[in-house]
Image (spheres, rainbow, N blue to C red):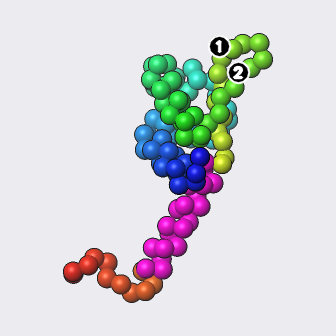
Amino acid sequence: MSAPRLVDRVLGALADPHRRRVIELLSVEPRRAGDLAREVGLAPPSMSRHLRALREARLVDEESPMGDARVRIYRLRPQPMAHLKAWLEDAERAWNEQASAGGPDRPGT
C-alpha cells in the first residue's frame, strides 16, 4: 500500500474515539480482544468491528496463543504511525514556510 493511502487509512481509523482508546491501551501492553472490549466499554461484536478497522489500517496485529485459536491478542504495529508522523512533519514544514513568507492568513482580508 502506498504511503499516502496508508496515511488516509490511519487517519480514518483514528477518527473514532473508541479506536483511539484501543490504541492508548495497546500502547501499554498487548491485550486480548475481550479485555479491550471491557476496558473500552463496548460489546464484543462492536469491539470486533473496531479491531477490524484498526487491522485494515495496519495499526494493529493479531495473534493467537499456541493451542487456542479462539483467543486473539492485539498489539500495535509501529510502521503506520511512522508514515503518519512523516506526513505531519511535511505538512508542518509547509505551513511554517507559508507563515514565514508573511502571506495573509485569509485571502481577501
Give the mark nearer the N terminus: 1 vs 2. Answer: 2
Q: Which residue lies furthest to the right in this view?
A: 66
Relative to residue 101, is residue 61 depicted above or below? above
Quadrant housing the C terminus: bottom left
For image coordinates 58% across by 23% down, the residue present is 33
- Residues packed near mark 2 inside 10 Å, few (<14), some (14 to 19) or many (20 plus): few
Look at the image and give the residue range highlighted in magenta: 80-98
Residue 38 lies in the magenta stretch: no
For image coordinates 65% across by 33% down, the residue present is 61
- Residue 5, given in percent of the width and then of the height, sits at 52, 50
Residue wearing tag 1: 70
Q: Residue furthest bottom?
A: 102
Label ID, residue 2: none
**Callout 2, which amino acid?**
Ser
Residue 87 lies in the magenta stretch: yes
- Residue 81, given in percent of the width and then of the height, sits at 60, 50
Nearer to the camera, 4 or 49:
4
Whole-Å distance between the Cαs marked 1 and 2? 7 Å
Q: How many marks overall? A: 2
- Residue 53, given in percent of the width and then of the height, sits at 50, 34
Q: Is the magenta stretch mostly helix, strand or loop?
A: helix
Label ID, residue 64: 2
Q: Is residue 105 left or right of residue 25?
A: left
Do the CB atoms of the residues marked 1 and 2 lie less than 8 Å apart? yes
